[in-house]
Image (tube, helix red, strand yellow):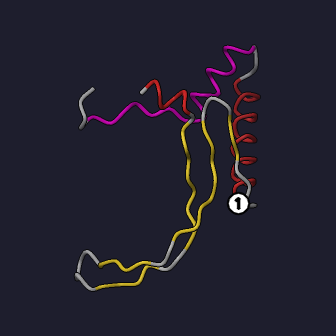
Amino acid sequence: MTTTQKPEAIGIPELATLLADRHDLTKANAKNILDDLRDQIVSSILDGKRVGLFGLGTFEVRPTKEKMGRNPKTGEQIKIPAGRKVVFKAAKGIKDKM
């Protein structure tokens, strides 16, 4: 793969198919499990909790500081307000394999 080529994307439907095949589930049940997992992760991080998935990584919300930026069209300086962002930190095992 070259650096300009995008990697193949895999989403919940593809993951549900893999999960269903490996664990003798229907695709609908596997998709429901993945949807619920996603919803629980989102709900937990929005409640201020860190979510760690062993072997995968950790999701959390971190605050951002107020800073100055530029409008790319006009070049005018603008103030970017403080906020929050979702951060994913990959597990050491994944980092070591890269």
* Residue picked out by circle 1: 46
The picture places residue 8, in percent across and down from the top left corner, at 40, 30
Q: Is 73 left, or right, of 55 in this rendering? A: left
Q: Is residue 81 above or below residue 27?
A: below
Asked if residue 66 lies left or right of residue 77, the reply is right
User: For residue 78, which quarter of the picture?
Assistant: bottom left
Which residue is located at x 23 percent, y 83 percent?
74
Residue ID at (50%, 32%): 10
What range is drawn magenta here? 5-23
* For residue 66, above or below residue 23: below
Q: What is the crowding at mark 1: few (fewer than 14 residues within 10 Å), some, or many (at least 20)?
A: few
Q: Is residue 73 left or right of residue 30?
A: left
Instruction: Give whichever of 74, 58 is nearer the camera.
Output: 58
Question: In the image, what residue occupies the spot 34% across and 77% down?
Answer: 69
Q: Main secondary structure of the magenta part?
A: helix
Q: Quadrant of residue 77?
A: bottom left
Residue type for callout 1: Leu
Asked if the stretch drawn in magenta spans residue 71, the answer is no
Picture coordinates of residue 23, whole percent (x, y) = 73, 15
Q: Which residue is at 64% across, 53% downward?
A: 60
In the picture, the quarter occupied by the C terminus is top left
